[in-house]
């Protein structure tokens, strides 16, 4: 399917037990060019029936519903008719979002505190952008991600051999970031992640990764030193940068987002700051995501001698960010996600007899 040709409207099914939310979402989406609301469902059971009957291009989903909740809906939908799903979830249920992503949801939007037109207007642009991006997701990708390991086993690493890894991601990023990190278990690396995500959700994302990976994972704070065996997640709604410490080594700095920043956190801001201070052997990875964030920063890293890799179109949920970095001439290697982790692990592993 060509992305350059005019296409039929994107068909959307709204699944939410709140009548006010259904009305607000319907009104919001029906005003957007290229979108068509083809159905509204009052719970997961009703939603599954309508999804199988209407075969929408994308579904918006509430998680807490009677009869059948959003999790059961996702499990059954992905088994019977894989379809891109965008979760609309409140700030009070951040951890639930990542369970939904693990079950195959495409992305999520933070639900406004009030179920009225004015409140939903605040997320209109983000929701419409993600609905449109979902059209380009291959149906065979809309399925549950592999289950995370249940037990956390922390492996020791050698500080003097530590290497820095920078990761940028957006739509489809949380499962991709986790899969990439699983391949680096036990290696002497420190990882800094800029994942497009609203404020407060990044803390839950970091906690989920911490529970399922061999790394210590936390939301980044100003002054955090770069240490081996650690993963730092850029806080949502703010910017994360790297700077050199007077006493030696590197530290993280959290800054307010500028009006000119299209994203917070911004991959470009992280990568560009890192280009000024990163040590030899640093790697940067651009994963799935909408738009072009990371391309300028990746080019700055390349000029600083850092090798930048990108996820291949064959596995990227949305190829926008990797493609932009590739077209900028910043990328040295392009690999599908299942090869990125093992290849990166091989490149970062200490020589035999030293690790």
Image (cartoon, helix red, strand yellow):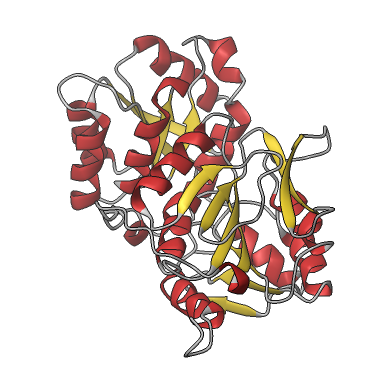
Residue, x 53% and y 37% (percent of image)?
202
Q: Residue 104, can we see it?
A: no
Q: In the rendered view, would you say 280 is above or below 110?
A: below
Hey, which quadrant is residue 301 in on the image? Answer: bottom right
Question: 328 or 212: nearer the eye?
Answer: 212
Residue, x 19% and y 51% (percent of image)?
79
Hey, which quadrant is residue 214 in on the image? Answer: bottom left
Left of 156 or right of it: where is 277? right
Left of 96 or right of it: where is 353? right
Question: 159 or 345: nearer the eye?
Answer: 159
Residue, x 53% and y 41% (percent of image)?
130
- Total number of numbered discs in the rendering: 0
Q: Residue furthest bottom?
A: 352
Hey, which quadrant is residue 156 in on the image? Answer: bottom left
Q: Position of residue 216 (x, y in %)?
A: 46, 51
Q: Residue 130, can we see it?
A: yes
Residue, x 60% and y 74% (percent of image)?
161
Q: In the rendered view, would you say 137 is above or below 21?
A: below
Q: Position of residue 164 (x, y in %)?
A: 63, 65
Q: In the rendered view, would you say 280 is above or below 86?
A: below
Question: 316 or 253: nearer the eye?
Answer: 253
Question: 63 or 305: nearer the eye?
Answer: 305
Q: Position of residue 230 (x, y in %)?
A: 53, 55
Q: Residue furthest front?
A: 247
């Amino acid at each position: 399917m060509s992305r350059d040709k005019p296409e039929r409207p994107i068909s959307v099914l709204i699944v939410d037990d709140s009548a006010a939310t259904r009305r607000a979402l319907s009104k919001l989406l029906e005003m957007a060019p290229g979108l068509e609301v083809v159905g509204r469902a009052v719970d997961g059971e009703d939603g599954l029936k309508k999804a199988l009957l209407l075969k929408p291009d994308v579904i918006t989903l509430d998680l807490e519903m009677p009869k059948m909740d959003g999790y059961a809906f996702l499990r059954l939908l992905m088994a019977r008719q894989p379809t891109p799903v965008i979760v609309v979830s409140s700030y009070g249920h951040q951890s639930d979002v990542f369970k939904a992503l693990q079950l195959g949801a495409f992305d999520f939007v933070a639900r406004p505190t009030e179920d009225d037109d004015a409140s939903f207007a605040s997320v209109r642009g983000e929701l419409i952008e993600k609905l449109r991006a979902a059209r380009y997701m291959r149906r065979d990708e809309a399925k549950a991600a592999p289950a995370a390991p249940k037990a956390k086993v922390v492996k020791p690493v050698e500080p003097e051999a530590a290497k820095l890894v920078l990761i940028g991601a957006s739509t489809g990023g949380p499962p991709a970031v986790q899969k990439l990190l699983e391949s680096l278990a036990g290696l002497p690396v420190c990882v800094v992640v800029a994942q497009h995500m609203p404020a407060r959700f990044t803390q839950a994302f970091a906690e989920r990764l911490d529970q399922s990976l061999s790394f210590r994972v936390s939301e980044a704070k100003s002054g955090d030193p770069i240490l081996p065996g650690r993963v730092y997640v850029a806080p949502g709604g703010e910017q994360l940068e790297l700077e050199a410490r007077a006493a030696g080594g590197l530290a993280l700095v959290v800054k307010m987002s500028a009006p000119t920043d299209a994203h917070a956190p911004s991959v470009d801001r992280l990568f560009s700051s890192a280009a000024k201070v990163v040590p030899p052997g640093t790697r940067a990875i651009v994963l799935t995501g909408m738009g072009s964030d990371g391309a300028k920063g990746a080019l700055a890293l390349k000029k600083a001698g850092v090798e930048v890799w990108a996820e291949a179109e064959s596995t990227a949920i949305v190829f926008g960010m990797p493609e932009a970095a590739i077209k900028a001439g910043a990328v040295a290697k392009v690999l599908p996600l299942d090869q990125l982790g093992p290849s990166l692990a091989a490149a970062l592993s200490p020589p035999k007899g030293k690790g």
